[in-house]
Structure formats: structure tokens, C-alpha cells
Amino acid sequence: RSAACTARVFDAVAVAIGSHQEPSQPTFPGMEVFKGVVAHSYNYRNAGSLAGKNVVVVGLGESGADIVREISGISSLIA
């Protein structure tokens, strides 16, 4: 089975997986050369730092959905 790949450029990655008490911070290929911000939802406080940025949210549980809702009006692109 072949999987299609699409390349996109992001300024920030919001990781929204794991519990609030013990966040799970996965690693992704290329993470070591990513020049943007990688932040876990555990450390998220407000949308201000993501204004105008291209953001990808990994994990769409309640925390991820809340972050997407908050940044949807101020970020350039959310994936």
C-alpha cells in the first residue's frame, strides 16, 4: 500500500496528547532541525504567541480541540 505525502511548512507544533499530570511528548522525524516552536498542551496558556503563524495541532482530544478553537481566529493556517 502506498501512502501519499504532502509537504507543508509550519511555524509551530502544538502537541495535545497525554494527560495533564504527565504529558506525553513524542518525537517526529525532522524534529531536530525544525526551527519553529514545539509545545505540549500542558504548557499552553493563551493563543497570543501563535498569532499569524502556521500551526499544526497533533492530537485532537479535548485539549487539542480547545487549542484549535482558540487559535482559529488569529493563526494563518491550522492543520
Image (cartoon, rainbow, N blue to C red):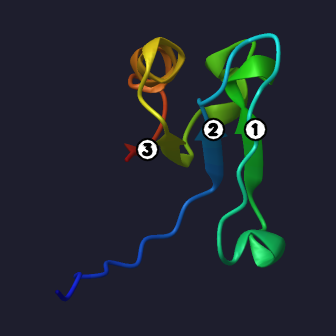
Quadrant for the N terminus in the image? bottom left
Q: Amino acid at mark 3?
A: Ser
- At x 74%, y 58%, the residue is 36
Q: Which picture quadrant has residue 69?
A: top left
How many numbered marks does the figure carry? 3
Q: Residues within 10 Å of mark 3 (few under 14, many from 20)?
A: some
Single out the residue that lies furthest toward the left.
Answer: 1
Q: Nearer the viewer, residue 25 or 34?
A: 25
Please name the residue that numbered disc 2 is placed on.
15
Which numbered dot is residue 28?
A: none
User: Residue under circle 3?
Assistant: 76
Question: Measuring 63% from the left and 34% from the top, which residue is drawn there?
Answer: 50
Q: Which residue is mark 1?
A: 39
Report x, y in % for residue 59: 48, 35
Which residue corresponds to the image point at 79% horizontal and 78% vertical from the top-left?
Answer: 33
Q: Secondary structure at mark 3?
A: loop
| Residue neighbourhood size for the residue with mark 1, other residues' Cα within 10 Å, grouped as few (<14), some (14–19), many (≥20) | some
Question: Height in image: 79 above or below 27?
Answer: above
Secondary structure of the residue carrying tag 2 is strand
Q: Are marks 2 and 1 in contact (CB under 8 Å)?
A: yes
Q: Is residue 1 above or below residue 31?
A: below
Closer-to-camera residue (52/30): 30
Amino acid type indicated by mark 2: Val
Real-space Cα separation, disc 2 to disc 1, in angstroms: 6 Å
The amino acid pointed to by label 1 is Ala
Q: Viewed as shown, does residue 33 lie left or right of 29?
A: right
